[in-house]
Amino acid sequence: QVQLAESGGGLVQAGGSLRLGCVASGRTFWRYAMGWFRQAPGKEREFVAAISSDGGKTDYADSVKGRFTISRDNAKSTVYLQMNTLKPEDMAVYYCAARGTTYYLPRRENEWVYWGQGTQVTVSS
């Protein structure tokens, strides 16, 4: 059983930056691949980024490549999403997700098992 808690959301102007964090419960964070998804108003939840259990493999949605960076600190049981050059279209609730398969990084949300409650990111123009 894994519990996830996101933090770091807020209001920024277009072109600004935010860093989201997600803390996982338990002592086995190192076993899990981690991902970030987002859901904008009126849209379905979409894949943003993912990282393998050891941090050696990452994947990004085309819409955020070059702007967002996913990272993790297994000693702190935390995964981060650094978001730079934010655009109004990045406005969404951002969710942290985990799965037990350590290296496989699926983009489909139904292949992820554990989810946080989400944190709101608002980008003003």
Image (cartoon, helix red, strand yellow):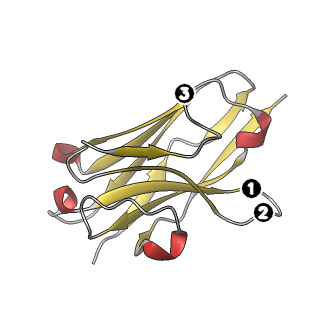
**Callout in the foreground (2, 3):** 3
Upstream in sequence: badge 2 or badge 3 = 2
The total of numbered circles placed on residues is 3
Q: Position of residue 20 (x, y in %)?
A: 48, 41
Q: Position of residue 123 (x, y in %)?
A: 75, 35
Q: CA distance from mark 1 to mark 2?
A: 5 Å
Q: Give the residue number, with chain letter if any, for mark 2.
A: 43
Q: Give the residue number, with chain letter if any, for mark 3.
A: 66
- For the point 78% across and 63% down, the residue is 43
Would you say 28 lies left or right of 113 here?
left
- For the point 51% across and 41% down, the residue is 8
Q: Position of residue 111 (x, y in %)?
A: 44, 74
Q: Looking at this view, is 52 or 85 the one in front?
A: 52
Q: Give the residue number, with chain letter if any, for mark 1.
A: 40
Image position of 52 with respect to 115: above or below: above
Assign a secondary structure to mark 3.
Answer: loop
Q: CA distance from mark 3 to mark 1?
A: 20 Å
Question: How many residues crowd around disc 1 within 10 Å: few (fewer than 14), some, or many (20 or more)?
Answer: some
Assign a secondary structure to mark 2.
Answer: loop
Q: Looking at this view, is 7 or 54 the one in front?
A: 54
